[in-house]
Amino acid sequence: MKKIKYLLAVLVGIVLTTACQNGYIDSIKAVAAGSDKTAPVVVVSYPAEGVKIQVPTLLASINIQFVATDDIELKSISVLLDGTELTSYNSFKDYRRAVEAYQYDKVTNGVHALDIKVTDMAGKVTDKIVNFEKKPPYTPIFPGELFYMPFDGDYVDKVSFTAATKVGNPGFAGESLKGLNAYAGATDSYLTFPLAGLKNNEFSAEMWYKLNAVPDRAGIFVISPSGTTDANFDASRTKGLRFFRESSGTTQRFKLNAGSGASESWFDGGANADVPNNIGKWVHLAFTVSGSECVVYINGTVVSHGSFPGIDWTGCESISIGSGAPNFVTWGHKADNSFIDELRIFNKALTQSEVQAIIQHDSPYVPKYSGEVFYMPFEGNYTDLVSNTEATKVGSPDFADGKKGKAYAGATDSYLTFPTTALKNSNFSAVWWTKINATPDRGGILVMGPEDKGNAGYPATQNLRTSGFRFFREVGGAPNQRFKLNAANGTADSWFDGGTNADVDPSTGNWVHMAFTISGTECNVYIDGQVVSHGAFSGIDWTGCDLLQIMSGAPRFTEWGHLSDLSLMDELRIFNKALTQTEIQTIINDEK
């Protein structure tokens, strides 16, 4: 047997030798490495640019992960944080590609620069710099805030540092209303979060939402008794709450159902609660629950509300985010493929002003028109959205249904005042909508004038017209109200009274658009986009004009009875330019 093995080995050797001699098998040849043409390439997979790390500890730990490649050969890699080397590499299994990870557990609060410095054999150097931040533990910024999930790369409540449980394969949107990312829904996928610590007699939730209308119905934020089945589905709705959407033709309608223990209540605002399927932008959603009522808001506007005797949390153990599952699926309110961002929960019933303050915090108003320096839409508050400054309320003004959303509703001896610091410009325009109440038969509307101190204390009336402006109404040709502007250049005042052209019949009950402009050469008054008065003017003087009065002549222009106006006002905007007629008509068309 040994002889046979020996003979076979000899034969194989002879065959191989012959093959090589005859050129049948190529001999091994050295291949030149070639010239080094390009610098190394570095891809950092973590941390990502701009990521914010928040943990309840003074120091954070990060797992730095990257891949470095070169066209010829890597020589060295240095990992630096804020200029200090953490570690280095100069030996590689694959001389052209290195896949590395390095755990560093001493990241302090603040902004940091991670630098992956890679050098190849030709001396070419690539620095890949990634900026990130470690922030202190999140501190709630709104009264009653118990829960905040920004979805910036994780599903963690930043108040409790508790992670939600992931069901299925929810993801991240790759975009956000605020921050780095947002929740992205997926089929049969959602989050659950323990309700412990969040069960209160008053409850509010708010979020930003980008609608995906497929599927045509879905659960969004659901707290229902656990173990719900079709057999006890009706009974289960007497506990907890369910916020969801359903198809309404070309729109999705948002609804709230809440249980008081013995019964359930529905809050369906009908068409008011509809969002177009193709809206393609972020929408703010909120709802509140108290011991007396529930309210649903879309973009800070009330779309549904009604009485409610109080919530019952019996059997409610968890929140479902992005789906009705597992406890509210009978009508197909399953996973929502939409995006969700900036989800917050409160232990109080938020007011409309508080909802709008959150909207303004998350998405500050950006002036819509050239030269716009002031915008007050009166959506449940008296805030200028450009400066985020609240006007001072005098008396008891109120709100009513407006041209858009809510409007200012005048009351006797009531008005607003606002600081004029950013409003005093050589060119000035104001535009707004009004629905006239002709009682009283005259009123101040917008006034920026000086205080009339007189020679001996304060007179009984205020009528110093040497600077600023006064826009007001008086009795016109019956039954009309006539709108007028008075403006002063520092030494004298000018009147812009269009006569019957500036008359409006208040009995029609229509919304009317008002505007006036002031420049260094002329003033113009517009009603519904048409010029009703104009004339030469040498330029405005603002001496002593430290106060803007809204919907009253008081306190600076009270002679002739131009006191508070009981009319409605909506969508008040002020500009640092003299608007053209075309620009005014554009605003009108946008707001119709």
Image (cartoon, rainbow, N blue to C red):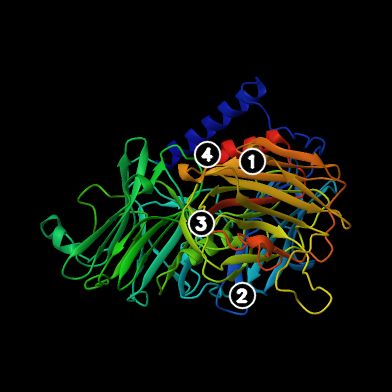
Mark in the foreground, 3 or 4: 3
Q: Residue furthest left?
A: 231
* Labels 4 and 1: the sequence-earlier one: 1
Tell me the tag on residue 439. 3
Q: Which residue is mark 4?
A: 592
In the depicted view, which residue is nearer to us: 507 or 3?
507
What distance separates the C-alpha of mark 1 from that of mark 2? 59 Å
* Inter-mark Cα distance, 3 to 4: 26 Å
Residue 24 location (% of width, % of height): 61, 21
Q: Secondary structure at mark 3?
A: loop
Residue 260 lies in quadrant: bottom left
Label 2, residues with CA under 10 Å away: few <14, some 14-19, many ≥20: some
- The residues bearing labels 3 and 2 have C-alpha atoms spaced at a distance of 57 Å
Q: Earlier in the sequence, mark 1 or mark 2?
A: 2
Q: CA distance from mark 3 to mark 1?
A: 18 Å
The type of residue carrying mark 3 is Thr
Can residue 63 be seen here? no
Query: Residue at horizontal 76%, vertical 76%?
Result: 458
Residue 517 pos. (x, y %) = 74, 45
Rendered residue at 39%/67% (across/down): 204
For the residue labelled by badge 2, is the local secondary structure a helix, a strand or a loop? loop
- Front tag of 3 and 2: 3
Q: Residue at x 46, y 63 (%)?
A: 352
The disc labelled 4 sits on which kind of residue?
A: Lys
- The residue pinned by badge 1 equals 502
Lateral position of residue 240 relative to residue 590, left or right = left
Q: Earlier in the sequence, mark 3 or mark 4?
A: 3
Vertical relation: 348 (above or below) 192: below
